[in-house]
Image: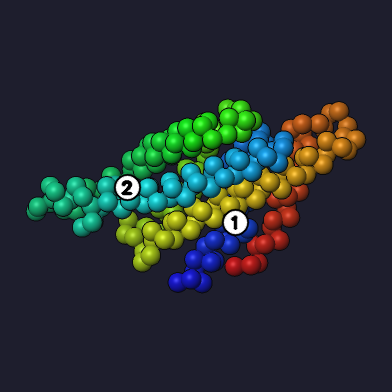
Amino acid sequence: MIGELFIIFIGVVLVNNFVLVRFLGLCPYIGVSRDLKSAAGMGVAVIFVMTMASAATWVIYHYLLASGPHNIWFRLFGDGIDPSAFNFSYLRTIAFILVIAALVQLVEMVITKSSPALYRALGIYLPLITTNCAVLGVTVLNVDSFFPGGEAVPGSFLKCLIQGFGAGVGFTLALILMASIRERLELADVPPALRGAPIAFMIGALMSMAFLGFTGLI
C-alpha cells in the first residue's frame, strides 16, 4: 500500500506534473511566477485547496453522486428501486466547482487576515484558483482513477488525498522553479521583444522538455 501511494505521489509531482506535462493551470504559472515569495504563497494555497478538494469531492461523489448501495439517496428512497436510478455522476463537474469555490473563499479570508502583503501580491490570481483547471482536473482525475465503473477501489480516499497533495506539490515545484529563473532573468540582457510573457513561455517549454526525462521513473 505504501509503495502504491509513493508511486501515485511521484507520478503527479514529476512524471505527470499538472503544469509541465498535462499543461493545466498555466494562467497562474505565468502570472504569479514573477517573484519567489508570491510563487511560494500561491503554491501553498493551491496545495491546500487541491488536498481539501480531493477529500471533499471523494465524499460527495462516493455518497451522493455515484450509484450503488453506499449512495445516501438510495438508502433513503431506494426500497425496491434499481440502484442505477440514483446515478448522479453527471453532476460531478458543477458539484466539484462549488466545493473548490468554497475552499478558495476560505483560503482568501485566511490570507487576507494573516498576510495582507501576500494577498496584494497575488492579486486576481488568488480568487482565480476557483477556475484553475488544474484544481478541477485533479478532482476529475481522482474519480476517473479510483472509481472505475462508479465503484471505489480499496483505499480510494487515501489515494485521492495523496494524489491531490502531490498535484499541489508538483504545481508548487513548477511555480517556484519558474519564479527562480525569472528572477535571475531580471539581471540578464533579454531582447525587448522577448521580455515578459514570451521569454516565460520559452522557459516553460524547456522545463516541460526537461520533465519528460522523469517519464521512465514509473
Disc 2 marks a residue whose amino acid type is Ile
Q: Where is residue 29 in the image (x, y as percent from the top left)?
A: 64, 40
- Answer with left or right where residue 15 lies relative to residue 205: left
Q: Which of marks 1 and 2 is nearer the N terminus?
A: 1
Marking on residue 74: none
Q: Where is residue 104 in the image (x, y as percent from the top left)?
A: 47, 36
- Kind of element beneath mark 2: helix
Disc 1 marks a residue whose amino acid type is Val
Question: Which residue is found at the position 36% from the left and 52% from the top?
Answer: 58
Q: Name the residue under label 1.
A: 13
- Kind of element beneath mark 1: helix
**Mark 2 nearby-residue class (10 Å; few <14, some 14–19, many ≥20):** some
Q: Position of residue 3 (x, y in %)?
A: 51, 72
**Mark 1 nearby-residue class (10 Å; few <14, some 14–19, many ≥20):** many
Question: Which residue is found at the position 73% from the left and 53% from the top?
Answer: 209
State whether residue 172 is above or below residue 190.
below
State whether residue 152 is above or below residue 203.
below
Q: Mark 2 points at which residue?
A: 60
Outermost residue toward the left? 80
Q: Position of residue 14 (x, y in %)?
A: 63, 58
Question: Which residue is found at the position 62% from the left and 59% from the top?
Answer: 15
Viewer can see residue 20: no
Outermost residue toward the front? 114
Q: Report if the CB atoms under discs 1 and 2 are less than 8 Å apart.
A: no
Which of the 4 quarters of the picture holds residue 100? top left
C-alpha span from label 1 to label 2: 25 Å
Question: Which residue is found at the position 45% from the left and 72% from the top?
Answer: 1
State whether residue 66 is above or below residue 198.
below
Number of numbered discs overlaid on the protein picture: 2
